[in-house]
Image (cartoon, grey):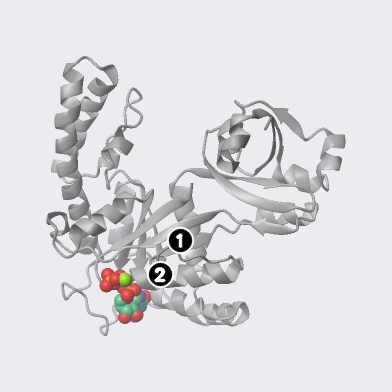
Amino acid sequence: MSTRIGIVGMPNAGKSSLFNALTKAGAEAANYPFTTIEPNVAVVPVIDERMEEVAKTLGSSEIVWDTVDFHDIAGLVAGAHQGEGLGNKFLANIRETHAIVHVVRAHTDENVIHPEGRVDPLADIETIETELVMADLEAAERRLEKVGKQARGGDRVAIAEERWLGEVVAALQAGRPARTVPVPEEAPNAARDLGSLTSKPVLFVANVDEGSEEVPAAVAAHAAAQGARAVAVSSRIESELAELEDEDAAAMREELGVSESGLQRVVREAFALLELISFFTAGEATIAQSWHLHRGLTAWHAAGQIHSDIQKGFVRAEVIGWRELVDAGGYAGARERGTLRLEGRDYVMADGDVITVKFTP
Ligand SMILES: Nc1nc2c(ncn2[C@@H]2O[C@H](COP(=O)(O)OP(=O)(O)OP(=O)(O)O)[C@@H](O)[C@H]2O)c(=O)[nH]1
Ligand SMILES: [Mg+2]
């Protein structure tokens, strides 16, 4: 299943500029057969140098990259939760994503109109968060009523969920996001079932002036208070750089004093938000492919990512860390060294594992 990240923010914050940069960079960097599912969805490959080394070692014929889908969501305005603007539609779009990239305007270009007529990143963040909180509050109150009935029937999961929902409603009423209330062990699906917007992990992207790489202090402090991360990029520069050849882009970055690709930083941080690990499948002289899995999941889950039939017929897995495979020069060398291990279905996958699942069809 593809990972979906929604780009949200105020109108004119720079969301589409960032989205366009991601789209072009993705098509460019990986020669990825870019598919436009919808005009506002960018399929961005998660480029991984470890995978490139594995593919080189094995003489893989092709690399298929794991991808993240970025959704460009139109600007939210105050009152969206009551249907202001195209409010409800936008909120529904956000509901379908796994994580949120919150773009906030921090550049001071007077030629770009700000909907409120002033540049105040923290106030903008609060406007957006208020809309998300209000939308969640309505949903949480409705769900509390429903789950409350089940809880009165004595259902243990419902009782735990009811208590959690009560705390969530209180947090939202105080203006705090749902993610600040830990999900109880007894009702692990409570947040998913609520479908709350404010329980999704957030990455703040400060859209800063050309040449700056500083996250404004107020934004950094706000992010830190939520346990969220923040990065600074110039959406406009990134979208212009994405148009250039690699060499020209590097020269222009140097001139501007922008060190690393801001886009790569956004993709990497967004991936980190979801607490995912990468694993690889790679045969000799065939396709090498990268995949993702939630941290803590097993070889059996990894098999399911690859194909449901492979999971169903799971017998055992051959697993090796990517570095060990590269050091051994391939599978034959790894077998000789004894670094290729046989693992059962309950083996907890590590970041960078290369796996071959043996299964009965
Ligand atoms: N100077 C400057 N202008 C920018 C930057 N990023 C975006 N802009 C400009 O701001 C305007 C709005 O940018 P968009 O990326 O379309 O903003 P948006 O958030 O998608 O806006 P909506 O879709 O209307 O909500 C455009 O004219 C951009 O060129 C930036 O980093 N610096
Ligand atoms: Mg836009």
Residue 126, image quadrant: bottom left
User: Seen in the image, is 104 located left or right of residue 292?
Assistant: left
Q: Residue at x 25, y 23 (%)?
A: 158
Crowd tier of the residue under label 2, counting other residues whose Cα lies within 10 Å: few below 14, some 14–19, many 20 or above: many
Camera-side residue of 229 and 159: 159
The mark found on residue 18 in the picture is 2
**Does residue 213 appear anywhere in the picture?**
no
Residue 149's label in the rendered image is none
* Residue drawn at x 34%, y 32% as measured from the top left: 189
* Secondary element at tag 1: helix
Q: Position of residue 145 (x, y in %)?
A: 14, 30
The crowd level at tag 1 (other Cα within 10 Å; few <14, some 14-19, many 20+) is many
Numbered disc 2: secondary structure: helix
Foreground residue among 200 and 65: 65
Residue 266: assigned label: 1
Please tell me which residue is depicted at 55% across the width and 69% down the height of the picture. 27
Mark 2 CB within 8 Å of ligand 1 = yes
Count of residue discs: 2
Q: State which image quarter holds ligand 1.
A: bottom left
Q: CA distance from mark 1 to mark 2?
A: 10 Å
Tell whether label 2 touches label 1 (CB within 8 Å).
yes
Q: Amino acid at mark 2?
A: Leu
Q: Nearer the viewer, residue 264 or 223?
A: 264
Q: Is residue 76 above or below residue 191?
A: below
315 lies left or right of 29: right
